[in-house]
Structures are given as C-alpha cells and as structure tokens.
Image (cartoon, rainbow, N blue to C red):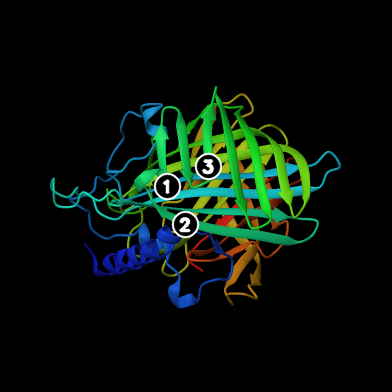
C-alpha cells in the first residue's frame, strides 16, 4: 500500500477512535487545516491492490443487492442532493451523503479479536441545508464504525444510516431524515425515471490504468416532498433530488488533484450530469464523464469530448482561504445545451474533516434552464 494511503488510514482510524466513541457530529469550522483529510487521496492510487477488489471491467449489476454496501471495495458513497421550494417559492438546497471507507480488507482469524466493537468499516456522513433567502449554509458531519448497528448499509430493503441520520426504503419510497443542531429534514423521495448506469454499463473510467475506475449508477430524478425545519419553523417543501451510488478501490490516478461535478434538472424534463477530473496542472485529465437523461427516461452517456466546462469567475472562502471557481459556462453541443451556472449563494463550503465545496446552483440558458448542484474538490 502506498505510504500516503497508510498515513490517510492512520488519520481515519484516529478520528474513528475519537468520534465513534462519542457518537457526536462535527460542526462546520471545527477542524484546523492540519486535521482535514484530502478526499482525493482516499480515492487515489497508482497501483492496484491485491487485498481489496477493484473496478476493472464491466460486470452485471444485480438489484437490490447492489444498492447496499460492497465491503470488498475500499471506498463507497451514497449521495443525495436536491432543490426544494415552499408554496410561496422560498428555496432550499439540501445534501445528505454517506461515505464508507474500508479500514482493513481481511477479517481477523477466529478467536484473535472477538470484541463487538471490532470493525473493518468506517462510515461518515455530511448533511447540509442551503437557505437561499437568508444566505446561510448549515453544514454538519458525523462519523462512526459499523459495529453494534451504529452505522451501515443494507440492500433489501435498502437502508443507509449513521445513528439517526438515515435513508430507508419503505414500500418503494425512500424515507430520509437528518438533523444537525437546529436544522433538520424529513423527506420522502419517489423515483420518476429509470436508473442510469454511468460510463460503460456502470463501469466508469477515471484514469489511465485499468483499475482507475468505479462502479457507478444514478437515479437522476426523484420527486421529493416533506419538511425542512430551521430553528423553530417547519417549512413544507416539494422539489427534485438526484442520487448517486459509487464504489471503488483506486478510482483516481495519483496525478489527479480533484474534480468538478455538476447535475441539473432542466425545465424541459431532461437531466444533465457532467464531471471534469483535474490533473496536477488543473486541466482535464481526459477521463471526464457525463450523461443526459431525456424526458422519457432514455439516456445518453457523454464522453469528455462531448461537453465543455469553462470557468468564468472565482470566489475566495472567508473561512478556509481557498479560492474556488464560482461561475461556469457548460456546453453540450450535440444536445443543444448551453448553460451559465451560478451558485444560489457563494458560501456553500464544507470545512469540517473533509473540506470541499458542494452547493445548489442555478443553470440559465437561452433555450433551457434549470436548478441543480455543483461539487468541487481539490482546491
């Protein structure tokens, strides 16, 4: 295993010992730069790993099994983002993301360690609500081990959770609940379109080596309704959400510094996702990817040469001092898509154990517009 990955696991294990025992969440701004973990390093390698399985080719997906955890792979996430409004048009964005990180890929021999606290898997989650009118970004984090039922992921029926942050399938619906400090969501999500198997039938290449890849599928359009509570006020809301599920062992090559990911629900019924993977020079590494889901549910997979992402402005975080892109132009010529993208508010940066920018954004064009989400790592 690469030495940098060993150091990363050391930090993860130390963090797990602190936070999994206390069971408490982390607030935005609670960690110093030195304590933060580079999420790109957790996904990077320039060599294969004989202990963990790797995404190295097209496989048949099997559901509901593949909705759950894939513990033989090192890294996995279940990713929900959405844009919601009240009946008066007040806008909120939300994110609830669950990550799984393997701490060891081999089970201890029988009798060597029989503690119920023993675990090979660490789960952590980010929860955020963007209050556009008040220009506030509420962000929290939780981390815990998968022992004793504290956290985990199941396939049938689907459930992923850390403590009382959870998404659970009930009679074909997804029930979501999360609370951080005085902000909470209680939402119900209903699938409106078929699943997208991203890349080559779910095999998503991210770099030059065969093992620089992941298994990846999306639910592009989930009708969403429920309540957002801020302080002592509950807001009934409706809108749309996007879901990604991805698992890998060494998805990114060692020369990758980060990525820029965009998803948008367009007002003509289409849904667009594009992602640029950036190399050490900050340029596209040649393995960007995307998809267009049509209004009828059929979809087209996009390669990097079928779309363009151009940065048109920047913003400097007052908390971390990091400078991020803050406006873009996205072009998908073959699908007559030209969009100018601007965040609903500038500051939607997570600054806890993992520092990155993830937030709601408006996508405006002459022929089609929409609202969606942007994620930026490695800045």
Write the residue at 41% across / 60% down: 21
Write the residue at 44% across / 70% down: 281
- How many other residues sit within 10 Å of disc 1, few (<14), some (14-19) or many (≥20)? some
Residue 240 spot, x, y in % from top left: 67, 37
326 on left or right of 87: left
Closer to viewer: mark 3 or mark 2 = 2
Q: Is residue 320 above or below residue 302?
A: below
Instruction: Pick the residue in front: 259 or 17.
Output: 17
- How many other residues sit within 10 Å of disc 2, few (<14), some (14-19) or many (≥20)? some
Question: Mark 1 to mark 2: distance in Å?
Answer: 9 Å
The answer to whether residue 201 of the structure is visible from this angle is no
Write the residue at 68% across / 60% down: 137
Q: Which mark is residue 23?
A: 2
> What residue is pinned by disc 3?
166
Q: Is residue 13 above or below residue 93?
A: below
> What residue is pinned by disc 1?
150
Instruction: Pick the residue in front: 5 or 182.
Output: 182
Badge 1 vs badge 3, beta-carbon distance below 8 Å: no
Q: Which mark is residue 180?
A: none
- How many other residues sit within 10 Å of disc 3, few (<14), some (14-19) or many (≥20)? many
Badge 1 vs badge 2, beta-carbon distance below 8 Å: yes
The answer to whether residue 108 of the structure is visible from this angle is yes
Instruction: Pick the residue in front: 343 or 127.
Output: 127
Which element carries disc 2, helix, strand or loop? loop
342 on left or right of 25: right
Residue 307 spot, x, y in % from top left: 55, 48
Residue 196 spot, x, y in % from top left: 49, 33
Which sits earlier in the primary sequence, circle 1 or circle 3?
1
Closer to viewer: mark 1 or mark 3 = 1
């Amino acid at each position: 295993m690469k030495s940098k990955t060993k150091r990363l696991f050391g930090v993860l294990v130390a963090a797990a010992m602190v936070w999994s025992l206390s069971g408490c969440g982390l607030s935005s701004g609670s960690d110093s730069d030195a304590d933060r973990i580079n999420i790109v390093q957790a996904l990077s390698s320039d060599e294969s790993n004989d202990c963990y399985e790797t995404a190295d080719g097209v496989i048949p997906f099997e559901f509901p099994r593949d909705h759950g955890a894939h513990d033989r792979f090192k890294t996995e996430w279940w990713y929900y983002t959405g844009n919601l409004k009240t009946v008066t048009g007040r806008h909120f964005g939300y994110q609830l993301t669950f990550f799984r990180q393997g701490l060891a890929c081999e089970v201890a021999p029988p009798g060597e360690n029989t503690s119920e606290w023993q675990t090979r898997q660490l789960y952590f989650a980010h929860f955020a609500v963007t209050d556009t009118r008040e220009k506030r970004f509420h962000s929290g984090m939780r981390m815990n081990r998968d022992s004793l039922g504290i956290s985990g992921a199941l396939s049938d029926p689907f459930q992923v959770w850390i403590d009382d942050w959870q998404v659970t399938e009930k009679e074909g619906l997804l029930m979501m609940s999360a609370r951080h400090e005085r902000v909470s969501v209680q939402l119900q999500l209903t699938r409106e379109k078929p699943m997208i198997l991203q890349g080559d039938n779910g095999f998503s290449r991210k770099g030059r080596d065969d093992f620089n890849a992941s298994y990846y599928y999306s639910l592009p359009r989930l009708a969403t309704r429920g309540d957002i509570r801020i302080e002592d006020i509950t807001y009934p809301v409706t809108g749309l959400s996007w879901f990604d599920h991805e698992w890998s062992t060494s998805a990114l090559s060692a020369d990758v510094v980060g990525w820029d990911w965009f998803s948008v629900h367009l007002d003509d019924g289409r849904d667009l996702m594009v992602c640029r993977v950036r190399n050490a020079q900050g340029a596209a590494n040649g393995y960007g990817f995307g998809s267009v889901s049509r209004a009828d549910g059929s979809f087209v997979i996009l390669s990097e040469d079928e779309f363009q992402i151009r940065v048109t402005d920047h913003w400097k975080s007052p908390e971390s001092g990091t400078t991020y892109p803050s406006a873009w132009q996205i072009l998908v010529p073959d699908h007559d898509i030209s969009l100018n993208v601007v965040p609903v508010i500038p500051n939607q940066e997570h600054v806890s154990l993992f520092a990155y920018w993830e937030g709601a954004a408006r996508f405006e064009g002459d022929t089609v517009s929409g609202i969606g989400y942007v994620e930026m790592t490695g800045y």
